[in-house]
Image: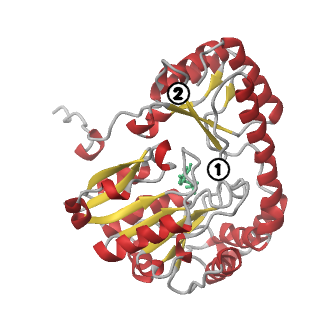
Amino acid sequence: MAARSFEKSERLRKLPPYLFAEIDKKKKAAIAAGRDIINLGVGDPDRPTPLPIIRSLQKHVEHAPFHQYALDQGAPEFRRAVAAFFKKRYGVEVNADNEVIGLIGSKEGIAHLPLGVLNPGDVSLVPDPCYPVYRTFSWFSGAETHLMPLRAENNFLPDLDAIPADVWRRARLMFLNYPNNPTAAVASRAFFERVVGLAREHGFVIAQDAAYAEMYYDEPPPSILEIPGAKEVAVELHSFSKTFNMTGWRLGFAVGSAPIVAALAQVKANCDSGIFTAIQFAGITALEQYDELTRPIRQLYRERRDTLVSGLRSIGWTVPTPPATFYVWIPCPAGFTSTELCTKLLDEADIVTTPGVGFGSTADGFIRMALTVETPRIKEAVARIGSLKLPPG
Ligand code: PLP
C-alpha cells in the first residue's frame, strides 16, 4: 500500500512566506556566479570571538564533569556571574538562584517563553517590524498577535495609546526589543516605566529582548529591570552573540520575575538538557572581562557606522545616525519599495541588504544595512551605490 503523502502541520502551513527568500536566492546565484558581493545583509559579526573567551573554553573543555548533561537553570557559577554583571552594569540586584536562567542563545528563550506564558485565545503584543520569532511562537502557543507598529514619528516606539481596551484586557504577553532590530532605536527609562505600569495594571508579562544592549555608541541603554516594580512583571533576554562575537556558540540568559523564569525553565526542562557547561564557563570569562572585551568591538562598529552614514549622506541619501546596534535603518529613496531597492542594489551594485518588509509590513519604506564588513568594503559599497544615481532618500 502506498504511504500517505506527507503533509506538514497546519501550524507550519499557516506561517507567512519567508520574505527574504527571493533575495536570498538571488544572493546565492550571484555568489555562485563569482560576482564580488558585499554582504550588508546579515546580523552576524565578521570578527572572531575575543581570545580570552576562546582560551577559557579550551581550558574548561578538558574538565570531564563538564561533558555530562548540564541540567539545572545554568551552572550556579554562571548564574552568579550574570547576577554580578547585572549589578555592575545596571545597578540591579538579581537573585542568582531563581531570577536567572541560562539560554542556548537568546532566540531559544524567546521561542520557549510564550509556551510557558500564553494560552489559546490570549493576545500577544508584538512590534511590527520585529525579529520574527516573537510572532511565530506566539502563534505556536495558540495565541493571537496584536501588532504594534513602530514608526519613525514615534521614535520607533509602539504607540501605547493606540492599543484598544479589549486588547489590553486579553493581553498576556508583550514583546519589546530595545535597542531595536531592525530600526536601531533605543527606549528611554520613561517609556519602560509606562509599560511596566500598564503590565501591572492589565496583568501581562513583558519580554524585553536585550540582544543588542551592549552594542551602543553613546549612553549605555537601560535595562527594563531598573524600573521599580519591573521585576514582578518582566523578563529581559540577553545574548553573548553580538556583544562578544559569539553567534555560533549559542549562549544567552534571561533575568527577571522568578515565577516567569520558573515557567520558562519548565518548558526548557521538557525539551532541552542545558548548555554545554564549558561554554557557560567561557561565558563567565566574557562577563568578568566585559569592559575590556566590549570597548574595542563598540569602537570598531562606530568607525564603520560613521563611514557608512557619512558616505551615504555624501551621495544625497537621508540616513539617521543609529544610536545603538550594528544596523543602519535607511528610508528608501522616492519611488522604491524595500524589496525593489534591495533587488536593485543586488542586481546592479552586487550589494546585499535586507528589505524592511521582511520584518513587518510597517517597515516597507526602509532597508537595513548591517555593519558586518570591514571599513574599506563599506567605502566600496558607498561608491557603488553612488554610481547608481538613485533619487535622494
Ligand atoms: N533578538 C534579536 C532582536 C536578534 O536580532 C537576534 C539575532 O539576530 C536574536 C534575538 C537572537 O540572538 P541569539 O544569537 O542570542 O539567539
Residue type of the residue flagged with mark 1: Thr
Q: Is residue 249 left or right of residue 11?
A: right
- The image quarter containing residue 18 is top left
| Residue 84 visible within the image | yes
Mark 1: few/some/many CA within 10 Å (<14, 14-19, 20+): many
Query: On screen, 355 above or below 216?
Result: above
Q: Which residue is the site of mark 2?
A: 24
Q: Position of residue 192 (x, y in %)?
A: 49, 67
**Spot occupied by residue 355 in the image (x, y as percentages of width and height):** 51, 31
Is the residue marked by circle 2 packed among few (<14), some (14-19), or many (20+) residues within 10 Å? some
Residue that label 1 marks: 325
Amino acid marked by disc 2: Asp
> Closer to the camera, 284 or 191?
191
Residue 144 image offset from top left, x and y in percent: 25, 54
Q: CA distance from mark 2 to mark 1?
A: 23 Å
Quadrant of residue 29 within the rendered picture? top right
**Of callouts 2 and 1, which one flags the residue occurring earlier in the amino acid sequence?**
2
Number of marks in the image?
2
* Camera-side residue of 124 and 272: 124
Q: Is residue 185 left or right of residue 371?
A: left
Vertically, is 67 above or below 370?
A: below
Query: SS of the residue at dot 1?
Result: loop
Q: Is mark 1 within 8 Å of ligand 1?
A: no
Q: Is residue 216 above or below residue 195?
A: above
